[in-house]
Amino acid sequence: MTWPFCAQCGTILTLQDIDSVECDYCGFTASCESLGLGQVSVVTRSKARPPPQWLEELNRGDSAAAEMKRATVEEPCPKCGHPEMSFYTMQLRSADEGQ
């Protein structure tokens, strides 16, 4: 069985209920029986997967961003004149990029 396309615009038809299909683009509707589909059933299967590591770290609160500590230097800030500045470094690209 091949899944039908809309006779008016060519878009693939969407199963609306157990015995009718509808085109999401132009609104064309037809019964599955009139298109020669017979009885249509939909079966959905999925496997449970563990959450990604970054999400687990974020939920625990120990992600790299949470552990980031700023270094301080005793130099006047050029913007506000405060006697100390704080900063931190980040890796912005892959280590082997540009090699």
Image: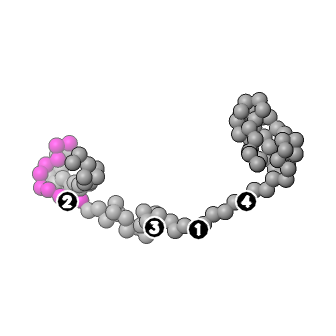
Asked where in the image residue 36 lies, by quadrant, the reply is top right
Amino acid identity at mark 3: Glu
Q: CA distance from mark 3 to mark 2?
A: 27 Å
**Is disc 2 in contact with disc 4, using a CB cutoff of under 8 Å?**
no
Label 2: which residue? 71
Coordinates of residue 31 in the picture (x, y in percent): 86, 43
Q: Is any part of residue 24 visible from this angle? A: no
The residue at the point 75 percent across, 32 percent down is: 26
Residue 93 left/right relative to 37: left
- Hey, which residue is sitting farthest left in the picture? 75
Label 4: which residue? 43
Badge 3 local density, few (<14 within 10 Å), some, or many (20+)?
A: few
* 8 up-or-down from 82: above or below: above
**Is disc 1 in contact with disc 4, using a CB cutoff of under 8 Å?**
no
> Which one is earlier in the sequence, the residue at label 2 or at label 1?
1
Label 3: which residue? 56
Where does the magenta region start and end? 70-79
